[in-house]
Amino acid sequence: MNQRNVSTAASARTAGSEGARALSRHAFLGLAGLTAAGVLAGCSSTGASAPAPAVVSTADPASPGNVSSFDLAGGTNGRAPTIKLNSGYEMPVAGIGVLQLGAQECYESVTAALDAGVRLVDTAYAYRNEAQVGQAIRDSPVPREEVFVTTKLFPTQFATAGTAIDGALERMGLDYIDLMLLHHPGSFDIDAYHAMERAVASGKVCSIGLSNWYNDEIDQLIEEVSIVPALVQNEIHPLYSEPQVIPHMHDLGIAVEAWYPLGGRGHVDQMLADQTVVGVAQELGRTPAQTILRWHLQRGVVAIPGSGNPDHIVENISLFDFELSETQMEAIDNLNRDEKLGSW
Ligand SMILES: NC(=O)c1ccc[n+]([C@@H]2O[C@H](COP(=O)([O-])OP(=O)(O)OC[C@H]3O[C@@H](n4cnc5c(N)ncnc54)[C@H](OP(=O)(O)O)[C@@H]3O)[C@@H](O)[C@H]2O)c1
């Protein structure tokens, strides 16, 4: 890990120690009650024949681990290292997203990703391909418990979130979902979050979080719920790098994940042709996509690039034999224009 990452993490820990202690207690209280109800065991023992997820570590909510600084030296190309979420579960820091992949393409991409060593897959009800993600995971020789799968509830599902969670499990054909997110703020979002908390208690979902949630909304939500979100997934890329949001989430013990990590379909070509990105990539002897993805990881941001191209999928999980220097990190940091490319 480079010096920049270490010092950023250290200062975040110092600055946020008071808040982190309070939250760690908050998470502990939530989890303690749920553990008494059999939560963590439930998630790992749903279904008589379901094996316990290998990605679950001994849940110790009192020391939720450090989600802001990744052990990138512990990864190898084709196998991303993990972070320990505040829920006690471990999650790989690099994966694949399947937005806009049609049924067959989605199945083939997830299959290619699993073959390439990817163990983190991001889908959503709104992508209409949860079934193909589940099918690819079930057909793969990779044991289910080695795969970390995320899906999301869309706002149209919030009012009936309990039923929607069961629907996701049914469509995917899985015994449990590793991480479930609320896709966007919306009517009944707190009710939907409570439904996800109940799904944790019953072992249907291991960890829960949010997408497209920002600092004020998070602070407000935490006041109203029992389980501190494990992760927030937001638009993050070199042109919109969220320098204020990421440290706030990290101070709360919440992992941060980037959607549109390469700028999103329609913008990727421009992003990968950026002169600064190309220059750093040439210095490193890596592709512009690898350079941007590694930049995310060194900032403590999980990346889930979308791809229907098996060569890109391999390239995107080959991020662990090089490192951006502090100067190279700053050069890409300086591309930030606070310019959202997505519509949320
Ligand atoms: N929560 C939310 O609101 C939200 C919103 C958007 C996205 N997401 C999630 O985030 C994931 C990532 O976002 P995204 O897929 O929209 O955008 P992205 O990952 O930034 O970009 C995907 C585009 O990059 C290309 N690409 C991937 N790897 C490449 C490489 N190595 N070299 C060159 N081009 C490459 C892909 O083309 P090829 O197919 O040719 O590789 C595709 O056109 C989504 O799949 C989804 O899971 C969440």
Image: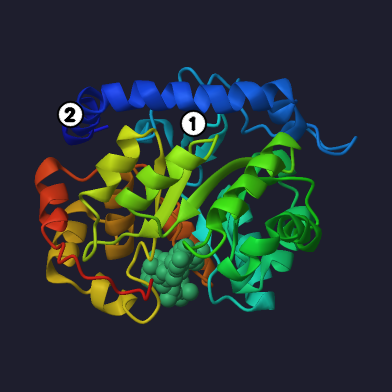
Q: Looking at the picture, how far across and down is residue 98, in whole percent?
A: 55, 67
| Residue 133 visible in the shown view | no
Q: Three-letter amino acid code at disc 2? A: Ser
Would residue 279 be found to the left or right of residue 53 on screen?
A: left
Nearer to us in this view, 242 or 301: 242
Helix or strand or loop: what does disc 1 sit on? loop
Q: Nearer the viewer, mark 2 or mark 1?
A: 1
Judge by depth and name the residue closer to the eye, 110 or 56.
56
Disc 2: which residue: 7
Up-down relation of residue 184 to residue 60 (above or below): below
Quadrant of the picture in which ligand 1 is shown: bottom left
Left or right of 253: which side holds 27? Answer: right
- Residue drawn where x is 54% and y is 22% of the image: 29
Where on the picture, by quarter, is residue 277? bottom left
Q: Is residue 150 above or below residue 103?
A: above
Can residue 39 be seen here? The reply is: yes
Q: CA distance from mark 2 to mark 1?
A: 22 Å
Q: Position of residue 167 (x, y in %)?
A: 77, 61
Residue at x 79%, y 34% (from the top left corner):
51
Q: Quadrant of residue 15?
A: top left
Quadrant of image for the C terminus: bottom left
What is the quadrant of the N terminus in the image?
top left
Q: Position of residue 315 (x, y in %)?
A: 42, 59
The earlier-in-sequence mark between 2 and 1 is 2
Q: Based on the displayed image, in which of its 4 quarters is residue 203 positioned?
A: top right
Q: Amino acid at mark 1?
A: Asn
Give the labeled residue for mark 1. 86
Say how the picture is coloured. Answer: rainbow
